[in-house]
Image (cartoon, grey):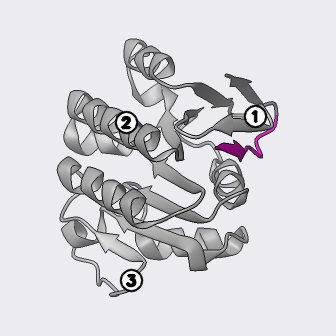
């Protein structure tokens, strides 16, 4: 199954099972790329957020016109920070952003229980590594990429380039089928 890709300079479509790495400056404006990825040619979507709360994700989706009816959100921050949590069928929580098994399990459950064209936004690898450490974060990302391949789904994974060692960034570039690079001035380049 092929998925349309609404990213400037990228191929028009990518095959199911494709993971796309979004490399950006830590202050880069990634919301437009992320939401264009999520709302194009999608039946159901999952946002795994290690950077913002479910409420902030919902506000972003609404602002950019992503159909929230088909969105599931995994909030990894609210429990640990003691924020109030709203129970909803489309919002899941794990106890802390370093609960990598819990995160991978929610991804697996989402992919197992939804049909059609499925997209995942993983925002972000950088925050995951901050809470868990580089090696464990890399292992979780590899697990999620395997799940995408098994379920013919696609994913966009955020990585703030200057926060990681060059070797770590290069390792992620090699791991993914496609790399979208966003520069500080807003220029987008793609390698697939």
Chain-order first, disc 3 or disc 2: 3
- Where disc 2 sits, the SS reads helix
> Element at badge 1?
loop
Instruction: Quote the CA–CA distance across marks 1 and 2.
Output: 33 Å
Residue 31 is tagged as: none
> Where is residue 142 drawn, in percent x and y?
34, 32
Q: Nearest the camera: 80 or 38? A: 38
Helix, strand or loop for disc 3: loop
What residue does disc 3 label?
A: 89
Q: Could you tell me if residue 126 is visible in this image?
A: no
3D distance between C-alphas at marks 3 and 2: 25 Å
Q: Is residue 22 left or right of residue 167?
A: right
How many marks the image carries: the answer is 3
In the picture of the structure, the residue carrying the numbered disc 2 is 146
Give the residue at x 41% y 16%: 171
Q: Residue furthest bottom?
A: 87
* Cβ–Cβ under 8 Å for marks 3 and 1: no
Whether residue 88 is in magenta: the answer is no
Front of the two marks 3 and 2: 2
Q: Earlier in the sequence, mark 3 or mark 1?
A: 3
Q: Position of residue 4 (x, y in %)?
A: 75, 46
Q: Position of residue 113 (x, y in %)?
A: 39, 66
Residue 2 pos. (x, y %): 68, 42
Q: Is residue 29 left or right of residue 154?
A: right
Point out the tag, 1 or 2, that comes first from the N-terminus: 2
Residue found at x 62% / y 42%:
28
Residue count near mark 2 (Cα–Cα under 10 Å), binned few <14, some 14–19, many ≥20: some
Q: Is 156 drawn above or below residue 66 in the view shown? A: above
* Main secondary structure found in the magenta portion: loop
Residue in view at x 48 percent, y 61 percent = 46
């Amino acid at each position: 199954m092929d998925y349309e890709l609404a990213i400037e300079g990228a191929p028009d479509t990518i095959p199911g099972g494709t993971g796309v790495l979004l490399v950006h400056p830590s202050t880069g404006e990634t919301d437009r790329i992320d939401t264009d990825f999520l709302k194009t040619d999608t039946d159901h979507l999952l946002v795994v957020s290690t950077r913002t709360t479910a409420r902030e994700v919902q506000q972003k989706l609404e602002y950019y016109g992503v159909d929230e009816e088909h969105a599931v959100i995994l909030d990894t921050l609210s429990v640990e920070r003691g924020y109030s949590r709203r129970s909803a069928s489309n919002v899941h929580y794990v106890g802390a952003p370093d609960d990598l098994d819990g995160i991978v399990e929610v991804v697996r459950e989402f992919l197992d229980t939804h049909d059609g064209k499925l997209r995942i936004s993983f925002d972000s690898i950088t925050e995951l590594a901050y809470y868990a450490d580089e090696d464990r974060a890399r292992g979780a990302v590899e697990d999620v990429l395997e799940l995408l391949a098994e379920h013919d789904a696609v994913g966009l994974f955020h990585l703030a380039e200057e926060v990681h060692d060059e070797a770590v960034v290069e390792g992620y570039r090699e791991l993914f089928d496609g790399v979208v690079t966003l520069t500080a001035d807003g220029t987008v380049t793609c390698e697939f």
